[in-house]
Amino acid sequence: MSGFLAPINYGRARDVLKKLSGYAVYDEEGAGRVHAVLRDSYPLIFQKTDQKMFDRQALLIEMPGANVADPLVFVCHVDAHPCPKTDFLAEGRPMAAALERAHVVALLEALEALLSEGYRPGGDLLIALSMDGLSGGQGAAGMAAHMRARKVSPCFVLDFGGYATHSAFCTYLPKNAPLALIGISEKGLLTGGVQAQPVPLKTGEPGLPPLSALLRGGARLSRGTEKPSLCKSTEQMLVALGKRAPLLQRLLVAKPRLTFPLLRFLWRKRAIMRQFFMSQRTLTGMTAAGDGVNRPESAALSFRQTTIPGKKLSAWKHRLREKIADENLRMDIEIELEHSARSRTGGEAWDALETAIEILFDRAVIVPCLSPYVTDGRFYAGLKGNVYRFSPFLVTGEEALRGECVVTDGSLQTAVQFFRQMLSV
């Protein structure tokens, strides 16, 4: 067994996770610190590869391969929502980490160790790390455009976004078998704000306070914030689950289009409904410009809308404007990302991913899914279509909702071994 274990510098991995933990929103100085941490921590990677910089300090790491296989492309964004307070200092103890950052660190740990052993990839290796995945993905879009211009045709593109769990669809699985969810597409995303100015009454009279109009608009936006629906990716997920499920459960998911109303009722309070079947709108903040004494001269609120594939973002924007329904309110869209195209669930790339998962997660049931997270993968669909989202960490239902995982020596060992296998495809 010891010969199977991948060599890992556990202390370095924990230290990198700790140093990256404060990077939540893109800014030039913060992205520069991320670059410095990675360069200092993984010297072999930066010595033996070429690096290019793109918009918003996105980093593309390249290494020529032996040209016996198609290029291997690994992508991820490094910015992430903050995790709850965690003890980073106690060596060997569990620590919480954002799933995307744990994904990146495990990948780089695997590559650093392989390079020390004389590793050369079968095909060209490209690792694309963006610094602004949560604020529009401009860096990933630039790197993807660069690859398209070079006509890169990868064996696969692997991002974070899926995971392994014992907490979802338990009654559909063999006893104690983990479920491995591989994202083959992802939700659409709209973020923006609603602005209000004073409403003029008559010449010489003060306007109505903008907060009144904004609060009415906000109240309308806060109604009907969740809309369940079934898309082709989640339909594939349910059908794949049914192949391993007991008879009763198999009947429930064998024809999801027919049984979804019942499933929606049965799962209405479960985390899986919010992750895979729900378009959700959240009001994320409200501000008012004033001096604290007089009524504010302007006010604004911000929102975030995720969408299940099936309806274009133009239809969602129209619906949001209808909800506001006030000539004194202006809606501005800041981030607009359509849902991504589906990748196929077959072929050499899918088989390689399944094999790596099966080796490390005993008796795992592997199914495609709609990724519940915002990932860079959507930008790379135009390369070839084999875009998959999977992070080799075992998470609970609540961790999955928050986009977190618990990193232990054992889970890090599993993750690094997974990436060693995928780097050797």
Image: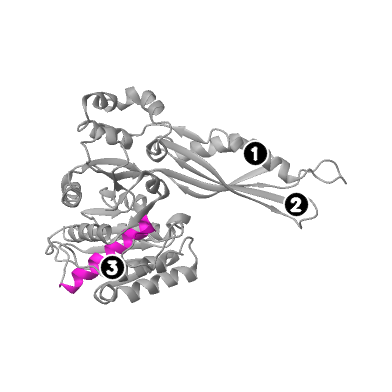
- Image vertical order of residue 93 relative to residue 189, above or below: below
Residue 85 at x, y = what percent?
Answer: 46, 59
Question: Label 1's element?
Answer: helix
10 Å crowding of disc 3: few (<14), some (14-19), many (20+): some
Question: Label 2's element?
Answer: loop
Of residue 27 and residue 202, the one placed in the foreground of this image is 27
Amino acid on which disc 1 is placed: Gly
Amino acid on which disc 2 is placed: Glu
Residue 132 at x, y = what percent?
Answer: 44, 60
Report the residue at 15% width, 72% height from top: 117
User: Residue at label 1?
Assistant: 217
On the image, which quarter does residue 290 sit in?
Answer: bottom right
Residue 303 at x, y = what percent?
Answer: 55, 46
Nearest to N terminus: mark 2 or mark 3: 3
User: Residue at label 3?
Assistant: 10
User: Residue at label 2?
Assistant: 297
Nearest to N terminus: mark 1 or mark 3: 3
Q: Tally the numbered discs.
A: 3
Give the farthest residue toward the right: 204
Q: Are marks 2 and 3 in contact (CB under 8 Å)?
A: no
What stretch of residues is rendered in magenta? 94-117
